[in-house]
Image (cartoon, rainbow, N blue to C red):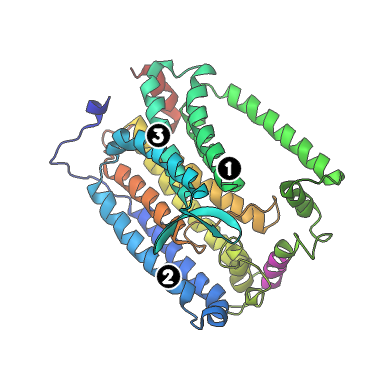
C-alpha cells in the first residue's frame, strides 16, 4: 500500500491553498489583538508587564506559523502512513505520563508534561494521532469496509485514545472531541449512513433524558452533574458554578450590536474568569459587539470551507480523510467553545482555536494546517474528481 503513495523526487506543486493560509493568518492576528486587549490589565497587575501573555503567544504563534508554511512545502503527507502507528502509541504513552513525576498541575488539573523550560498537553497530540491513524486502517480495509462490523476496529482506536485522555487527565471535553473526530472520519468513509443515523438518534434521546433527569432532580456525587444543573439554572448558582457563565453573558449583552470599542471591556478586569482562554469570545462580543462575533464566526466558516475544498479534491482517499479529521477537529472545538459562552451547553473548558491563549494549542493547530496545506499541494485539478466526499464510499468499495 505504501508503494502506491510514493511520489517522484522532481515533484512540482500545481496548487497551494493560499485561502486556507490567509484565514489562519487573519484568525491568528485577530486573536493576538483580542488577547492583548483581554490580558493587558491582568498582566500588569500580576507580572508588572502588560505584554506578558501577549508576548508569549505572539512569539509562539509567529514561529509556529512560519514552521507550518515551511513544513507544508517540504512534507509529503504520505509519510504519515508509515509514522501513524508510532504516533498513535506515542500519544498514548505521553498521556499516561501525566500521572508520573513528569506530570504538571495547572489550575488544579494535571494535564501537562513538564520538560524543564517547556511544557505541553499530550492530549493535543492525541487529536492528531487519531486524525492520522484511523484513515490508515480504513484505507487498508478496502472492500471489507462495509457493514456495522467494519467500523468496530476504527471506532475502538478512537475510543481507546478518548478513554485514555479522560482517565489520565480527567479532560472530558478533549475526550469528547477526540471521539467526535474518530466518528466523523468513520462516518464520512462508510458507504452506509443508516446505522450512524440510528445510533445518533438513540444517543441524542439518551442524553436529552439524562439532562432532563439531572435538571429536575437534585442529583449529587459528581461535579459533572453539578455542571448540568448550573447550566440549566445559572442564576440559582450565581455565587458558585454559575458565576463565570453569567459574567460572560453580561459581557455579551453589554456589548450590544457594535460593542463598547476595542480595549473598552469592563468584564475583562477580573469579572470574567479565564477571559483569555475559554471565555475570550465573550470579550470579543463585549468590545466589538454582535457584529464582531459574527465576523469571527465567518472567518472560521471560511477556514472550514477551504478545508472542505482540499478534502474534496485530495489526490487519494488517505489525504481526503486526514483533512476530514482536521475539519472535524476545528468545527467541533469552535462549536463547543461558542456554545459554552452562549450557555447553550454546560461548561467544558474548550478553547477557541487560534484565538484563545495557549502555546500548545497553537503549535498543534499549526501542525494540522501544515498537513492540510501539504495535501493541497498535491491536488491536480485537471485530474481531480468532483465531489470527492460524495464518492468516498464508492472508492472504499472498489479499493483493494
User: Would you name the residue on which mark 1 appears?
Assistant: 166
Alpha-carbon distance for marks 3 and 1? 19 Å
Alpha-carbon distance for marks 3 and 2? 32 Å
Q: Earlier in the sequence, mark 3 or mark 2?
A: 2
121 or 273, nearer to the observer: 121
Report helix, strand or loop for mark 1: helix
Between disc 3 and disc 1, the foreground one is 1
Q: Which mark is residue 327?
A: none
Q: Does 71 sit left or right of 245 as displayed?
A: left
Q: Earlier in the sequence, mark 3 or mark 1?
A: 3
Report helix, strand or loop for mark 2: helix
Alpha-carbon distance for marks 1 and 2? 28 Å
Magenta span covers which residues? 247-255
Residue at image coords 52%, 23%? 152
In percent of width and height, residue 230 lies at 77, 54
In percent of width and height, residue 68 lies at 32, 55
324 or 243, nearer to the observer: 243
- Check the image and report above or below for 64 versus 323: below
Between disc 1 and disc 2, the foreground one is 1
The N terminus, quarter of image: top left
Mark 1 surroundings: few (<14), some (14-19) or many (≥20) residues within 10 A: some
195 or 387, nearer to the observer: 195
Q: Is residue 294 magenta?
A: no
Instruction: Please say whether residue 334 is visible from this viewpoint.
Output: yes
Residue at image coords 30%, 57%? 67
- Dominant secondary structure of the magenta stretch? helix
User: Would you name the residue on which mark 3 appears?
Assistant: 133
User: Would you name the residue on which mark 2 appears?
Assistant: 56
Amino acid at each position: 500500500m505504501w508503494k502506491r503513495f510514493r511520489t517522484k523526487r522532481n515533484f512540482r506543486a500545481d496548487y497551494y491553498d493560499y485561502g486556507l493560509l490567509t484565514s489562519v493568518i487573519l484568525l491568528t492576528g485577530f486573536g493576538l489583538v483580542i488577547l492583548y486587549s483581554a490580558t493587558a490589565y491582568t498582566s500588569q497587575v500580576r507580572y508588572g508587564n502588560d505584554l506578558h501573555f501577549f508576548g508569549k503567544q505572539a512569539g509562539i504563534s509567529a514561529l509556529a506559523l512560519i514552521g507550518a508554511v515551511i513544513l507544508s512545502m517540504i512534507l509529503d503527507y504520505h509519510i504519515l502512513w508509515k509514522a501513524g502507528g508510532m504516533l498513535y502509541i506515542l500519544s498514548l504513552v505521553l498521556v499516561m505520563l501525566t500521572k508520573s513525576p513528569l506530570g504538571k498541575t495547572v489550575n488544579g488539573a494535571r494535564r501537562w508534561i513538564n520538560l524543564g523550560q517547556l511544557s505541553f498537553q499530550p492530549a493535543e497530540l492525541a487529536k492528531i494521532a487519531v486524525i492520522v491513524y484511523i484513515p490508515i486502517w480504513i484505507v487498508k480495509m478496502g472492500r471489507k469496509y462495509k457493514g456495522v462490523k467494519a467500523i468496530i476496529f476504527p471506532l475502538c482506536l478512537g475510543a481507546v485514545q478518548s478513554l485514555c485522555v479522560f482517565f489520565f487527565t480527567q479532560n472530558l471535553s478533549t475526550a469528547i472531541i477526540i471521539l467526535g473526530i474518530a466518528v466523523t472520519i468513520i462516518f464520512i468513509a462508510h458507504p452506509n449512513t443508516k446505522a450512524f443515523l440510528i445510533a445518533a438518534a438513540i444517543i441524542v434521546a439518551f442524553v436529552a433524558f439524562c439532562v432532563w433527569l439531572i435538571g429536575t432532580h437534585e442529583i449529587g456525587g459528581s461535579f459533572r452533574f453539578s455542571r448540568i444543573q448550573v447550566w440549566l439554572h445559572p442564576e440559582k448558582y450565581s455565587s458558585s458554578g454559575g458565576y463565570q457563565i453569567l459574567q460572560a453573558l453580561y459581557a455579551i449583552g453589554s456589548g450590544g450590536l457594535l460593542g463598547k470599542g476595542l480595549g473598552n471591556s469592563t468584564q475583562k478586569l477580573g469579572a470574567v474568569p479565564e477571559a483569555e482562554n475559554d471565555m475570550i469570545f465573550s470579550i470579543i462580543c463585549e468590545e466589538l459587539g454582535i457584529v464582531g462575533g459574527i465576523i469571527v464566526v465567518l472567518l472560521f466558516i471560511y477556514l472550514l470551507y477551504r478545508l472542505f475544498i482540499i478534502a474534496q479534491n485530495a489526490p487519494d482517499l488517505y489525504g481526503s480523510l486526514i483533512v476530514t479529521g482536521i475539519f472535524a477537529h476545528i468545527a467541533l472545538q469552535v462549536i463547543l467553545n461558542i456554545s459554552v459562552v452562549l450557555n447553550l451547553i454546560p461548561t467544558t473548558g474548550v478553547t477557541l482555536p487560534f484565538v484563545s491563549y495557549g502555546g500548545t494549542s497553537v503549535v498543534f493547530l499549526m501542525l494540522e494546517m501544515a498537513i492540510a496545506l501539504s495535501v493541497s499541494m498535491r491536488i491536480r485539478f485537471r485530474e481531480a474528481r468532483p465531489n470527492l466526499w460524495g464518492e468516498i464510499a464508492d472508492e472504499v468499495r472498489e479499493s483493494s
